[in-house]
Amino acid sequence: MTTSTITEYPVMEHFATIQGEGFYAGTPAYFIRLGGCDVGCHWCDVKDSWPIDTHPKIESKDLVDAVLESGLNIVVITGGEPAMHDLTALISSLRSAGLKCHIETSGAHTLTGNFDWITFSPKKFKAPLDSVISLANELKVIVFNRSDFQFADEYKSKMEVGAQLFLQPEWEKRDEMTPSIIEYIKEHPEWRISLQTHKYMKIP
């Protein structure tokens, strides 16, 4: 196995915040949002992250320094679609510094790096890889319309035993879809609801 020579990454933004979604909601974490996405969700709320070349490239060691300066010990790699990049060097550097590494991915690309937590959020626009599904700790399905409940159950059946299952209303349709999600979860209690609490709190 060859060692990755990629040590710098296109970074749209990086910042200390509170995780707003899923299993770790409410937990302080340092977010690194990488540029680049080929999934193309029409309701994406960070479309500025899609291009790769418009974002400055930052060395792994400089990102590690920024995280350590924040005093936080959980790093969330997000995007865009972060798995488009070879993350071996970045994750190795973060873990060597004693930091826990999480990733949020659509599963459409092979994962590189050794993660402490993998949030798998499949999209209809680009099929995920079975190799990612089998590694995921958490399934988070964005509910844009009622057909997404069937989509969610299709992936629920593919998850490993013990994986956390979340349904999350798409932000612009939260008033319409949240009541439906609540009723669905009452009938299917293996699921939990995820809300974008950071948006309610008006933090990044």
Image (cartoon, rainbow, N blue to C red):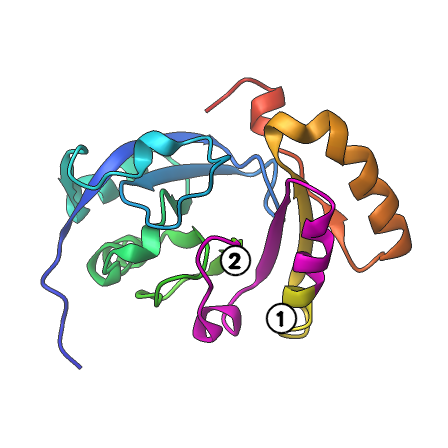
Callout 1 environment at 10 Å: few (<14), some (14 to 19), or many (20+)?
Answer: many
In this figure, which residue is indicated by the disc labeled 2?
120
State which quadrant residue 70 falls in: top left
Is residue 65 something that shows in the picture? no
- Residue 122 spot, x, y in % from top left: 53, 56
State which quadrant residue 112 falls in: bottom left
Judge whether 119 appears above or below 4 on screen: above
Separation (CA) of disc 1 from disc 2 = 10 Å
Quarter of the image with the N terminus is bottom left
Judge whether 144 appears above or below 111 on screen: above
Residue at image x 14%, y 66%?
4
- Residue 16 spot, x, y in % from top left: 40, 30
- Residue 171 spot, x, y in % from top left: 61, 29
Amino acid type at circle 1 is: Met
Task: Give yes or no for residue 186 being in the magenta stretch.
Answer: no
Left or right: 15 with respect to 165? left
Left or right: 188 with respect to 1? right
Residue at image x 36%, y 42%?
79
State which quadrant residue 157 falls in: bottom right
Instruction: Say which element carries label 1.
Output: loop
Amino acid type at circle 2 is: Phe
Task: Give yes or no for residue 140 being in the magenta stretch.
Answer: yes
Is residue 40 something that shows in the picture? yes
Task: Name which of mark 1 and mark 2 comes first in the sequence.
Answer: 2
Judge whether 60 appears above or below 204 on screen: below
The boundaries of the magenta stretch are: 124-153
Judging depth in this view, the residue of 42 and 75 nearest the camera is: 42
Instruction: Say which element carries label 2.
Output: strand
In this figure, which residue is indicated by the disc labeled 1?
159
Residue at image x 36%, y 49%?
81
Q: Residue 149: which disc?
A: none
Quarter of the image with the C terminus is top left
